[in-house]
Amino acid sequence: MGTEALNGIVVLDLTRVLAGPMCTQYLADLGASVIKVEPLGLGDETRGWPPFGPEGSAVFANFNRNKRSIAVDLKTAEGQAVIHRLARKADVAIENFGYGVAQRLGVDEPTLRGLNERLIYCSIGGFGAGGPLSKLPAYDVVLQAFTGMMELTGDVGSGPIRSPYSPNDYVTGMNAVIGILAALRRRDLEGVGERVDVSLFDTAMGLLSYQIESYWASGRLPQKNGSSHPSMCPYQALDASDGPMLLAVSNDSQWQRFCDVAGAPELKTDPRFATNAQRVANRPETLAAVQALLATRTGEEWMVLLGQNRVPCSPIMNLDGVLAHPQTTNRDVIRTYRAADGGERPAVTVPVKFDGEDRTVGRRPPALGEDTAALLSESGLSDDEISSLRERHIVG
């Protein structure tokens, strides 16, 4: 059985694409009841994003487990009234519409919190609700470009490179979860809801805080470093005798142990390498010395020797390698859910474990509008009222 930490919390999910759905899926995995509101027809646009598997779009499936779907035409007054009914009983509402759209659709903060003063209303934006760029559309890659992330990513001499796992989307979703949980706690104390405002821009600036602080301290703009780190050495991918591996020496104790394991104790007292600051200052010489040592053994041999002596290192693996690794099995990171066809489908769990509770991935991703009738019935509408809404294409 999975966690029920948020059991009883009802979330009205008006989001689509990545950051918002990831936030609401985390809330669902923590026990909340999530109602995913989708437009008639195509629904969440990620339903149309390849690749496609038995559950449809892999992208949609990854971010929309454990939710119930209601399809509503929010461009109509009656469709808006449906959402207002749901909002009266909700604890949290989350939206990531473009500038002014939530107000135009009647699901903005003043409207929904006017119906329910205990409602926590979370807005997820691109550049945020204020500032000269607040009206512009933005996706993860836009903020990677705008904040300098793409300029920092890759090897020296390479052009702008997109980080492939959409860090701004993922972390904005996590930031939204943090803000919502804090607002729920404050509501416990004060009895009223509030607005939570997160944005991809704020997230990106937060992720860059180390580089920003380093720039303020040194007066030099950070540069591309490939797999290395500007403040530590050796801390990057290097070559064992049979291929690349990762060595991550982050302090002088680890350096001394590495030198002993590698059979080069003289490097511990060499004035070019004795401290991390000296190794960084003499980076080319440090890397040359370390590379010569690593080339004497295979990566697997180094993994054993360095691991036994608590020197951080890793093979350079692909997804197949990590999915098959015993560590992945031991941590229960991958679990299965019952698919629509009765088969079992794997999914990645929420990355939090609670004492005495199993991690699960819960219910399969919903079909578009799959739960419309049930949700409307729970809101108090009669079968005739629901049929009328369907016949007039207000819901689907």
Image: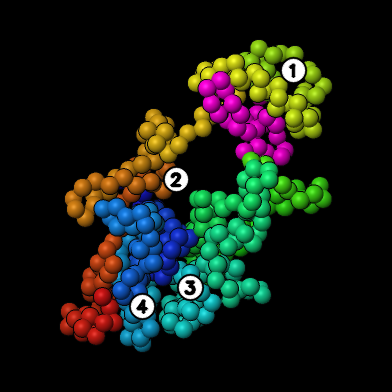
Quadrant into which the C terminus falls: bottom left
Label 3 sits on residue: 97
Image height of 111 relative to 267, above or below: below
Q: Name which of mark 1 and mark 3 comes first in the sequence.
A: 3
Quick one: label 1, few (<14), some, or many (20+) residues within 10 Å?
some
Percent across and percent down for residue 15 are 43, 68
Q: Which mark is residue 83?
A: 4
User: Which amino acid type is marked by label 2?
Assistant: Val
Residue 183 lies in magenta, yes or no? no
Q: Which residues are magenta?
A: 227-254
N-terminal of the pair, mark 2 or mark 1, is 1
- Residue drawn at 36 percent across, 87 percent down: 77
Badge 1 amino acid = Leu
User: Under tag 1, what secondary structure?
Assistant: helix
Question: Image quarter for residue 319?
Answer: top left
Mark 2 sits on what residue? 352
Residue located 68% across and 29% down the image: 234
